[in-house]
Image (cartoon, rainbow, N blue to C red):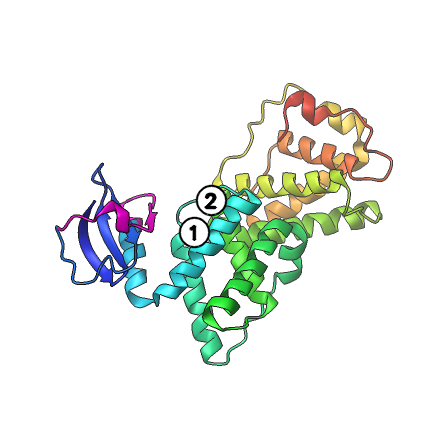
Amino acid sequence: MKIIKVINNNVVSALDKDAKEVVIMGKGIGFQAKPGQIVEEGRVEKVFRLEDEKSAGQFAELLRKLPEEYLRVSDEVIRYAKSVIGLKLNPSIYITLTDHIGFAAERYKKGMNFDNPLLVEVKTFYPAEFQIGKYALKMVEEKLGMKLNEDEAASVALHVVNAEYDTGVRDTMNITCLIRDAVDIVREYLNIELQEESLHYARFITHLKFLGQRIFTGQMLGNDDNGFGEMISRMYPVEYACSEKIAHYIKMRYEHEITDEETAYLAVHIRRIQPDQGSDADLHQEKGEK
């Protein structure tokens, strides 16, 4: 690989064999190095491949401004997310998470605490991602000597969600609020206590996550349901009415309309999360999980 820019003694930008810009980490790899020099493979510790040249350039510029230790913490957290939790993440996470760690570190040094208003929601709806956030706090304390509060774990988790579902920060926060409010609507409309430890509840939350993703990325399901929605409205009139209430909330709050098919699938999930209703026919399996 040929060096393009030297970022610091241990990090350089380079071109790989396909002439794609990458960021390389290795002990002393940038010391007295110059653009045009070839990097010996044996000295390469880590290669960061971003989505495109612009992202690679942004990453390199970020690393010019931040201590190398922040990148190492970020890389360790991402490795944990991929290998231990098994998540597939957009490479942009290297930029956003490293930048966030730097931002959190600066606030810590200034004695500024950050309250995340979605802490409870993140812990409830994204338990795996929150676990990654807690691991990040552990790494920051071990590697950087900074003890960050639990709210920062939630913030890290949201960055992970962004990379996992390929959404922006604002959309991820909107999706999280949508999930919270939809659950509240179901709980109030049906006047029931939801069994949050149940498999059907977990599937309901997953459905809401992907519904939110489809809403904010403009990839809604089509409206050609071949009578599926009408059938569901007859079979489960109460649940369908509850689903329509959620659809109305989405239209009023986010100015997005969901299709009849989306409304029908939501009604099926609402039916299944109710006590003693989980044995109903898996209609969503017949039509394909949504």
The location of residue 203, given as percent across then percent down, is 69, 38
Task: Answer left or right for 206 relative to 81.
Answer: right
The location of residue 65, given as percent across then percent down, is 30, 67
* C-alpha gap between disc 2 and disc 1: 7 Å
179 inside magenta stretch: no
Q: Which residues are magenta?
A: 37-55
Question: Is residue 150 shown above or below 171?
Answer: below
Element marked by disc 1: helix
Write the residue at 48% across / 76% down.
108
Q: Nearer the viewer, residue 50 or 264?
A: 50
Q: So how many labels did they put on this image?
A: 2
Element marked by disc 2: loop
Label 2 sits on residue? 89
Q: Nearer the viewer, residue 186 or 156?
A: 156
Going by the numbered disc 1, the residue's amino acid type is Ile
Going by the numbered disc 2, the residue's amino acid type is Leu
